[in-house]
Structure formats: C-alpha cells, structure tokens
Image: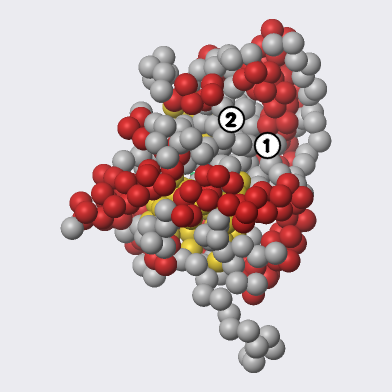
Amino acid sequence: MTRVDSRPARARLLPSHLRRAVIGAPMAGGPTTPELIAAVGEAGGIAMIGSGYLDAAGTRAEMARVRELTDAPFGVNVFLLDRADSDAALSAAGGPGVVAEFAAAIGPVAQRLGVALTPGPEFTDFDQDATLDALVEDPVAVVSFTFGIPDPGVVRALQDVGSAVVVTVAGVADARRAVEVGADWLSVQSAEAGGHRSTTTVGEEPDDITTLALVRAVREELPETEFVAAGGISTPEDVAAVLAAGADGVQVGTVLLRTPEAGTSALHRAALGDPRFTESRPTRCYTGRFARSLVNEFVDEFDAAAPPAYPHLHLLTGPMRKAAAQAGDPEVPPLWAGSRWREADAYADRPAAEVVADLWDRAVQQRG
Ligand SMILES: Cc1cc2nc3c(=O)[nH]c(=O)nc-3n(C[C@H](O)[C@H](O)[C@H](O)COP(=O)(O)O)c2cc1C
C-alpha cells in the first residue's frame, strides 16, 4: 500500500535502541514524576508517565512538564479498564453487596481516621478513551498498556503516528495475544513485581511465577519478540540474570521509589527502609486487584476478606488511605514494594540517573 503521507515513518523505539535498556516503570498515583522521567531518559533509559489515575488533561499536563525538562524520549502508560469484565468479576463474587460487606469490615479503621466510607461507588475508567485520543493527536515515543490487550485498531492508530506500542503481560498466553494484536514489544511482569499485577481480567487469581521462570517461558514461546522483564529486579546481578535468561531489558519500579526525583511519600520511603516490615504480598485489599505491598496491619487483617472488586475498592479505600498517610500511619496505606525491596536498599536516596547507569553498566560488565 502506498503511504499517502510523504514523511518517512519514525523508527519505533525498541529496548534494543536504548543506550541502557532500563525502563523506569510508570507508577501511577504519584511516585513517577516528570523529574524522574527526565532523569531516566537522560541516563539513556526511558520512563513512562503513569496515566492510570489521570484524565486526559492531567496526562497532557504531565507530558508538557516532561518536555520542559528534557528532549529525551518518554512514554505514557494507559490502564485498559473494562466495565463488563469488572461487573463479571463482582457478580461472580456475589454482587455489589460484597463491597458493602468489605466496607463494613474496614469501617472501624476508617472511623479511627475520621473518614466516612461510601460503599458502592460508581465504576470509572478514568477517561482512557480521551487519553488515547490525546496520544494520537500529540504522540510520544512509547505507549504502554496495563490490565488488558488493546484492540488492533488502537495499536495501529498509535503506530501510525510513530509511537511504539507496549503491552504489559503477566503470562505466556497474554504475551502471545499481545504479539498477535501487533505490539512492538512487551513488558513481561512476574509475581515478584511491586504494585499491581497486570492480569487482563479482574477475577483471575494470578500465579506466583518468578521473573526468571517467566522470562525463560516467554523467550521460548516468542523467540523473535523484544521484551523487558519486570519484577523484583533490584541489583546489577538481577539485571544480568534476566538478560542471560532471554530478556532484552528490564523494567524497574521499586528501585526508583527512593530516588530524590520520585514523588514517593515520606511515609512510603521510610517504610521501605524500616526493619519493622519483613514481608511483601500481593493483595486485593486496597484496590480489588492484586497488587504487591509490604505487609502492614491493614494487609494482615483485611487481605483474606477483600473481594475482586476493581476499581470499587480503589475508590472506596482512597480517602482512608490518604487520611492515614497524612496522619503518618504506615499501618493502613499501601506500601507498594516488589519482592526484592530489601535488596534495593543499596540505591536508597541515590539520583535516578546513577541507579539506571549502575544497574545497567555493572550488569553488562558481569556478562562480559
Ligand atoms: C508504586 C508502584 C506503582 C506502580 N504503578 C504502575 C502503573 O501505574 N502502571 C504499570 O504498568 N505498572 C505499575 N507498577 C508496576 C511496574 O510497572 C513494574 O511492573 C514493577 O514495579 C516491577 O517490579 P519492581 O517494583 O520489583 O521493580 C507499579 C509499581 C509500583 C512499585
């Protein structure tokens, strides 16, 4: 087919094109700031705006701020939320009443913090269609998707304006589906990852596969596909191991949470270095979807009772989480952390550019 547009197509950005194939994770809700994105980009990696909880205008504002700070390429991550899937998960779990039951269970905690809980808030998709329109109108180097496989038409529309399309997948079957819709590369996320696990349905119980095992399985299934590995990658040795297992790069979140450029709260930063916390666990208790947090009193008490109701629990617990954080109480809010948060200690308070350079360069040296 002849291209009507006479401009040459921009080469789409792949991990192998980066000076250092380190992807700074999109961390929606505050930790990933424009400053962090600029620092990672200038170090030869690439980082992504976490648009998951922003509307289109908020995403555009973050894009403008990144462009003020750097000419380096950056990406935008979009949550693919599907109301029909969300409703199906809730109805299989017993219907909206299970959200009200959970609200009643956590009521005393909210009350102690002076917050009124409103059970059964409306579903919201955070305006994802408008965000995608904005990204077609004003393209960025990379658009990544989480919680779903985009339609081929969406993938093509983004590729037509020069963006590389990335899909975050939690298993081999979804990796194959992502390739089939035309993704340029994948972010392969294991059970070790901090924050949400990118399963494509709310209802499924994710497995507990390690990053190394998942990398090997995806490489075997998709020998030609470029992908980065995510989950518990906290040291140059971790990077070297996943590269040796077949990944083309890494995506890191936890190791960047304590950099000065990150927007991580003081409470969260302190908890990551606090010996009081000895375990991290994937739990539905904050948002209704599995996400890995340090185990504090709230996780300990409410993990088992939390229904698969996303984003209902996210909306329900939001004000209470905020009040707890403002009160300086680490026993209530989520303390997102990957399985190897302890190993990330060595990078605490170091500038993001140094973290990216050290992780990559020492891994490459080790591989010889
Ligand atoms: C605080 C936090 C927030 C996150 N938010 C997002 C997000 O908005 N979108 C996304 O695709 N992944 C998100 N993730 C997951 C990361 O993309 C990545 O898979 C994970 O951080 C890798 O594991 P690690 O934390 O052990 O490095 C988040 C992770 C953390 C720690």
How many residues crowd around disc 1 within 10 Å: few (fewer than 14), some, or many (20 or more)? many
Viewer-proximal residue among 3 and 299: 3
- How far is mark 2 from mark 1, CA to CA? 9 Å
Residue type at mark 2: give it.
Arg
Q: Which of the 4 quarters of the picture holds residue 216?
A: bottom left
Regarding residue 50, the answer to whether it shows in the image is yes
355 relative to 283, above or below: below
Classify residue 26 as left or right of residue 224. Answer: right
Classify residue 140 as left or right of residue 232. Answer: right
Provide the secondary structure element on which disc 1 rests.
loop
**Image quarter (top left, top right, bottom left or bottom right) of the N terminus:** bottom right
How many residues crowd around disc 2 within 10 Å: few (fewer than 14), some, or many (20 or more)? many
Tell me the number on the disc at residue 310: 1
6 relative to 63, above or below: below
Residue type at mark 1: give it.
Tyr
Viewer-proximal residue among 64 and 116: 64
Q: Where is residue 249? Give x, y as percent.
A: 38, 56
Residue that badge 2 annotates: 284
Seen at 62% across and 54% down, the residue is 68
Seen at 63% across and 37% down, the residue is 29
134 relative to 122, above or below: below
> Farthest residue toward the bottom?
2
> Farthest residue toward the left?
368
Seen at 58% across and 80% down, the residue is 9
Seen at 75% across and 51% down, the residue is 56
Classify residue 217 as left or right of residue 319. Answer: left
The answer to the question of whether label 2 and label 1 lie on touching residues, with beta carbons closer than 8 A, is yes
